[in-house]
Image: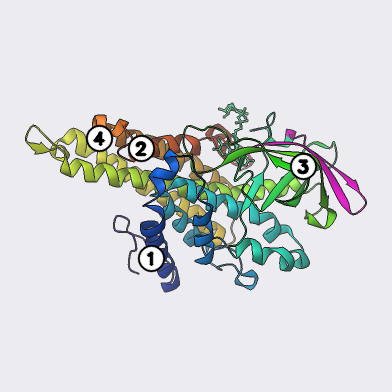
Amino acid sequence: MPSTSPSVDRTLPTEEATALLELTRELVREELAPRAATYEAESRFPRDVFRTLGKAGLLGLPYPEQYGGGGQPFEVYLQVVEELATVWASVAEGVSVHTLACFPLAAFGTEEQRRQWLPDMIGGELLGAYCLSEPQSGSDAAALSTKAVRDGDEYVVNGTKAWITHGGEADFYALLCRTSDDGARGISCLLTPGDTPGLSAGPPERKMGFKGSTTAQMRFDDARIAADRLMGEEGQGFKIALAALDGGRLGIAACAVGVAQGALDAALAYAKEREQFGRPILDFQGVSFMVADMATQVEAARALYLEAARRRDRGQSFGKQAAMAKLFCTDTAMRVTTDAVQVLGGYGYVEDYPVERYMREAKALQIVEGTNQIQRLVIGRHLAKG
Ligand SMILES: Cc1cc2nc3c(=O)[nH]c(=O)nc-3n(C[C@H](O)[C@H](O)[C@H](O)COP(=O)(O)OP(=O)(O)OC[C@H]3O[C@@H](n4cnc5c(N)ncnc54)[C@H](O)[C@@H]3O)c2cc1C
């Protein structure tokens, strides 16, 4: 199969997948690249870019075609996310979060619920968000306290969700909330419309990076949500949340590899051009070894997330591999982007080049969807179980 990215030698499973990656690269070149730096500098959320991606069929790639999805293997979907992240991580992460937000309905909804809502969600018109974290419960997600009380045909929801990507921008929220005091078994998942009365967004967080991605608290104040928007059964929410996160972590891993690849490409191009002591700095072994290590780490990281994705595509368990991929790919992105800044010297430390942004983005990826300490905890538990 032909490779789509000039700097990445991809092996894709079908001609259709190759065409999809080519389309993605075209969109990256024409829609994302010209705007990424400005939007990030101005903390602007590019809602219209998500519409464009939706129209191109890139917002529902791993979901079944019968509901308007792309019917693509996870390994193809993730490589699309990676390509987006080479230029604009806020958009790539947004696609990953949207895909995560659709998962509870796609995997746990009834046939009737899927037919009713899924086509709009994955068809590109609507944008999703995933509401698990709270101000007092992050890593210990099962300690969440946002409460949903059944009242006739509705749930009445009160509480605050924190750090919500697309908070205030999304059309629907996959909400994890408490329907009983029974610890992790007392959590349920409600697919909440964005225009629900009583649902409101706090001011956007002022973040170190990912400034083009809105992150905000979401407040539920006697918000009434129809009971038929319950995903799965009452009490199944935590299981749904964890299953969603297995796939979500692969999305973050792919994002991280894209960010690392973008930084590597920028560093390599610079090292070929920049001259000191009368020679391109790439001629110095100190620089070329650094770039060689960066490239090797990026390839290893890509191989790890792709292997986890292929396990998922084959229907095998992949939770341990997803945690390993999230851990390794995001730590790799942190190292590679830091080295990219070093390769550019002083020019790496200013906003005229994208590498300082890549470094700020890599840091967030070590934190979101379970910090890398929590990934180690997940891997350790898998190993202990044998
Ligand atoms: C940019 C951004 C976007 C986000 N988007 C979303 C979103 O869309 N939806 C959503 O629900 N959440 C989102 N989050 C929240 C994110 O998932 C949490 O920040 C993350 O899970 C960590 O929770 P916390 O920030 O409360 O940190 P804490 O849980 O308070 O952790 C603080 C530190 O303690 C460590 N720690 C905690 N417990 C342990 C342990 N048992 N062993 C070892 N170390 C431990 C952590 O690793 C960390 O270093 C987002 C966060 C950011 C920064």
Q: Residue at x 44, y 67 (%)?
A: 20
Q: Are marks 2 and 4 in contact (CB under 8 Å)?
A: no
Secondary structure state at the residue bearing disc 3: strand
User: Which residue in the structure is indicated by mark 3?
Assistant: 177
User: Which residue in the structure is indicated by mark 2?
Assistant: 337
Q: Is residue 156 magenta?
A: yes
User: Which residue in the structure is indicated by mark 4?
Assistant: 344
Q: Identify the magenta region.
A: 143-162
Q: Are marks 4 and 1 in contact (CB under 8 Å)?
A: no
Dot placed on the residue nearer the N-terminal end, 2 or 4 = 2
Left or right relative to 359: residue 57: right
Viewer-closest of 122 and 254:
122
- Disc 2 residue type (three-letter): Thr
> Residue lying farthest right?
152
Question: Residue 264, relative to residue 24: is it above or below?
Answer: above
> Is the CB of the residue bearing disc 3 within 8 angstroms of ligand 1?
no
Dot placed on the residue nearer the N-terminal end, 3 or 2 = 3
